[in-house]
Amino acid sequence: MVRPKTHDEALRRTLIELAATVVFESGVKALSLRRLATDAGTSTTAIYSLFGNKAGLLDSVYRDAAKQFAARLALVDTTDDPAADVVKLGLAYREHALANPHLYAVMFSDRFVELDLSAEQKDAGAETFEPLVEAVRRAQASGQFAPAPTEHIALSCWAMAHGLVSLELSGAIPPGLDIAASYEDALRSVVIGWSR
């Protein structure tokens, strides 16, 4: 009789989610494999079996965060209006970040800077930028955007989205201001600024 596999994909996902939450709330140094195993209802043996060690777990957490973010951005349909697509990507950016603040923090907050990211991790993170670069490239090819360096335009659009989302998630918004009400307008202002 074959023994059931207990260190499966469901446990792997649970451990990644729990680890990302710990990192989000308390930073990398607070991540204890023993505590994580207890919280997941498993053993440290399972963690070592699935990830090798703490560094392997953290690598998986980062890669998973990047993969989920890239997957969300990939859901944004491309249309014959690439400038509008840039705005839609910014909206998807915010939607994903608000729905998954722990994964957003893994990629973009100082909670994860305690680690030196590998070249592979940096590549995984960079993939999340590519849909925006491609939309900007299409907007330039169609004559909607100025002939500036494509990555400069994409970076300014990314920075607007990132800045507003980071302010929203950190609660560092001045009283009386509503990012949700002005977010799309802010994105559109950057798009208009790069228009021909």
Image (cartoon, rainbow, N blue to C red):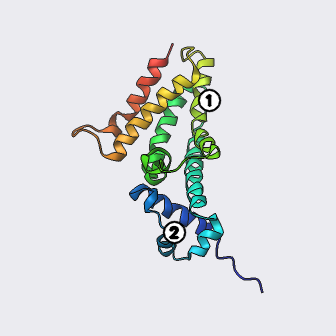
Residue placed under numbered mark 1 in the picture: 134
Q: Which residue is painted at 60% across and 64% down in the image? A: 53
Kindly state the secondary structure of the residue where label 2 is placed: helix
| x and y percentages locating residue 93 in the rendered image | 48, 41
Q: Which residue is painted at 53% across and 27% down in the image? A: 154
- Mark 1 against mark 2, which lies toward the viewer? 2
In the rendered view, would you say 35 is above or below 110? below
Q: Which residue is painted at 54% across and 66% down in the image? A: 14
| x and y percentages locating residue 180 in the rendered image | 35, 40
Which residue is at the front of the view, 86 or 81? 86
In the rendered view, would you say 57 is above or below 129? below
Residue placed under numbered mark 2 in the picture: 33
Kind of residue at disc 2 = Leu
Other-residue count near label 1 (Cα within 10 Å), few / some / many at <14 / 14–19 / ≥20: some
Kind of residue at disc 1 = Glu
Mark 1 vs 2, N-terminal side: 2
Which residue is at the front of the view, 193 or 112? 112
The residue positioned farthest toward the bottom in the image shown: 1
Which residue is at the front of the view, 142 or 122? 122
